[in-house]
Amino acid sequence: MGTEERKRREKEKRRELIIDAAEEVIRKKGFESMTMDDVAEETELSKGTLYLYFKNKSAIYLGLAERGSRLLNRRFAKVLTIDKPGLQLIRQMGEEYLDFVREQPIYFHAFIYYESIQDLEFLQSDPIAKRCEENARENHSYITRALQIGMQDGSIDDSYDAKQLAVMIWASSRGLVQVAYLKNSGHHSALLDDIELDIESMFKSFIHLLGEGMAKKE
Amino acid sequence: MGTEERKRREKEKRRELIIDAAEEVIRKKGFESMTMDDVAEETELSKGTLYLYFKNKSAIYLGLAERGSRLLNRRFAKVLTIDKPGLQLIRQMGEEYLDFVREQPIYFHAFIYYESIQDLEFLQSDPIAKRCEENARENHSYITRALQIGMQDGSIDDSYDAKQLAVMIWASSRGLVQVAYLKNSGHHSALLDDIELDIESMFKSFIHLLGEGMAKKE
DNA sequence: CAATATAATGACTATCAGTCACTTTGTGAA
DNA sequence: TTCACAAAGTGACTGATAGTCATTATATTG
């Protein structure tokens, strides 16, 4: 009988509901202020039950990061279906990343949280952490793919190593996007206010700069 | 009598000692695991006394960020004294940043912490937070200065806005440097391991890429 | 329907940030 | 030097909250 299977699916569904609730609580109270009691109330479960579905609070945050990285990957995958030069695809992915952070800042916060986890044991044993890792890998592969396309169509200098370049683009964009995140979320910074910069145009400018650097020289 | 002044200095000294202790505790136990009791023990003060010098635990972390940003600024200021083309100076600052994070990862962690603070009230009232802000501004001015030098000596394309470009360089480098930090600190990432990349060379490559992008075209 | 397994519960414990009534130390006037 | 007062220091206490576990409720199955 498919009881076994049904149970597994129901458990997965419940996990998703708990993550939904966590998202809702964070929307109301902020990321760091979320408590397990809040999530319990929001889900209408008891606190103890939460721990049947998630090892600890970290695991819930990780669940958010996993969901976020999945959503981001979906956007990137879509970009790859567009028929344009590789360099354009990279540009488009940058735009998507920025939009993503603006529309769903909670997930970006969860990424930051994920990266702050130092507990190796936890990172290697938890299946959600594993999926985060896989998602990061998938994300990297999309960027690499776009670069390879660009190298073939001549829009990107093929003397670079695509995989390494992908890491560079990913990491540096992350830095830029984080600035966007900081501006959006509470963290006020007079420096950023002063410099008359809407992030949008700065990001465009940055991608242009990268493009210049990557472009094939004659 | 200079009693007033002496007291002020002693208070400042004590604050520094507490930050020293916090650093030591973090070295032993990790950033997030530091407790006020730990710091109290390390300083051989009572917990209550800590609160006479720091409003709360956040303020101690902030103290670390302030110290860190001061040290980083010192490095950047030094670079500016070198007589080389602007583009070279930017390159050198990148190297310094990377070294800094490798040698003093605790401060970089404190930067991340600082950025995660959302409490506007606290950020605007706390004098240490103010100094962090000032340090960030100073840091930005060093990068801007190097860019301006580069624009004058022709090593950097002067069609960019120096201030805006400085933010872009700062933010993107931050992303790269963070990868270095992740590799060093506990956070294991199979993705980063797989791609045969020592950060050193990737960072060099990135600065080269930026350089290409910023370089004056004929 | 009874026996057993699985899921859910919430009172409880441990930890830790932050407080405050009390004690100790320092200062300056008599 | 001594006393009164102020400033600095203390640690037991409180409140919040992550995580546990003995107990209860529900589902499954022979």
Image (cartoon, coloured by chain):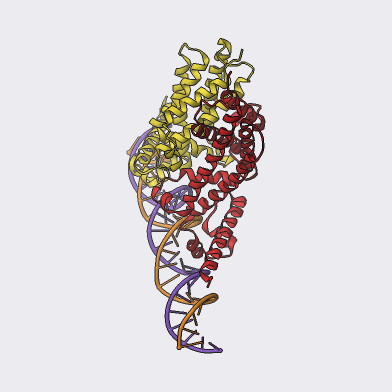
Chain colours: A yellow, B red, C orange, D purple
Q: On the image, which quarter does residue B192 sit in? A: top right
Can residue B187 be seen here?
yes
**How many dots with numbers?**
0
Quadrant of the snapshot with the C terminus of chain B = top right
Residue A89 position, x and y percent, is: 49, 17
Residue A120 position, x and y percent, is: 59, 40
Residue B124 position, x and y percent, is: 41, 50
Q: From the viewer's perspective, is A28 left or right of A158?
A: left
B7 versus A133 height, above or below: below
Residue B13 position, x and y percent, is: 57, 61
* Nearest to the observer: residue B139 or residue A88: B139
A22 versus A217 height, above or below: below
* Nearest to the observer: residue B85 or residue A108: B85
* Nearest to the observer: residue A152 or residue B78: B78
B128 versus A185 height, above or below: below
Residue at x-position 63% and y-position 35%? B89
* Nearest to the observer: residue C30 or residue B106: C30
B125 versus D25 height, above or below: below
Can residue B40 be seen here?
no
Q: On the image, which quarter does residue A121 sit in? A: top right
Residue at x-position 55% and y-position 30%? A171
